[in-house]
Amino acid sequence: PVKAFDHKGSAYVSDIIKGIDWCVHNGIDIINMSFGMKKRSEAMLEAVRNAYRSGVIIVASSGNDGRRGHIDYPARFSQTISVGAIDRKGGIAAFSNRGKRIDVFAPGEKVLSTWPNRRYHEMTGTSMATSHVTGILALALAANASLTPRKMKRLVALGQLPLKSKSGKSRGPGRIDAIRAFRYLK
């Protein structure tokens, strides 16, 4: 793992960029970016573009503000696979940011995760959803090492099940389904 944030969970954009660049120069295949920024950074966009051009897949969380029509950076960049969260009932989680730039949704409410001292802890957020998608993409990449970021984004689009709205009609991106995604793996 590459850690760009300090022990309090804060980071400078320059530290994040250094982390991305390190990944590119050291042959890392997938970067999980479970954080969000409200402001666009041209320097970060350039680092993300460079990673994308270098074949690095970036998966980023949409944010936990419950905002409609807006997602955080770097998930807003077109070179990332942007992830929103669904709740335990399979609907979009109230806390999840959502908008037209979301690529996919994944479980993000009360997800059991590892914790220090051999314990487990339930966590909630789009970061948890992002980790689900990153894991599925890592398995896909293990099965087919020739998958590019563009092909992975297409695999995510094909490998999802529709979300139902209150009206009963599906619309927009759906939830990731590993089995469905692997059917489209070539």
Image: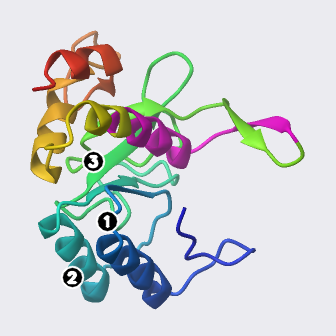
Q: Position of residue 154 (x, y in %)?
A: 12, 37
Q: Are marks 2 and 1 in contact (CB under 8 Å)?
A: no
Task: Name the residue type under label 3.
Answer: Gly
Task: Name the residue type under label 1.
Answer: Gly
Q: Residue furthest top?
A: 168
Instruction: Using the numbered discs, state the Cα–Cα distance from disc 2 to disc 3 in whole angstroms.
Output: 23 Å
Where's the N terminus, which quadrant?
bottom right
Q: Is residue 177 visible?
A: no
Task: Give the residue number, with chain letter if any, for mark 2.
Answer: 46
Q: Earlier in the sequence, mark 2 or mark 1?
A: 1
Instruction: Using the numbered discs, state the Cα–Cα distance from disc 1 to disc 3 in whole angstroms.
Output: 32 Å
Task: Give the residue number, with chain letter if any, for mark 1.
Answer: 27
**Mark 2 vs mark 1: in front:** 1
Q: Earlier in the sequence, mark 2 or mark 3?
A: 2
Q: Position of residue 103 (x, y in %)?
A: 24, 42
Q: Is residue 14 visible?
A: yes
Q: What residue is at 11 percent from the left and 42 percent from the top?
A: 151
Task: Give the residue number, with chain letter if any, for mark 3.
Answer: 99
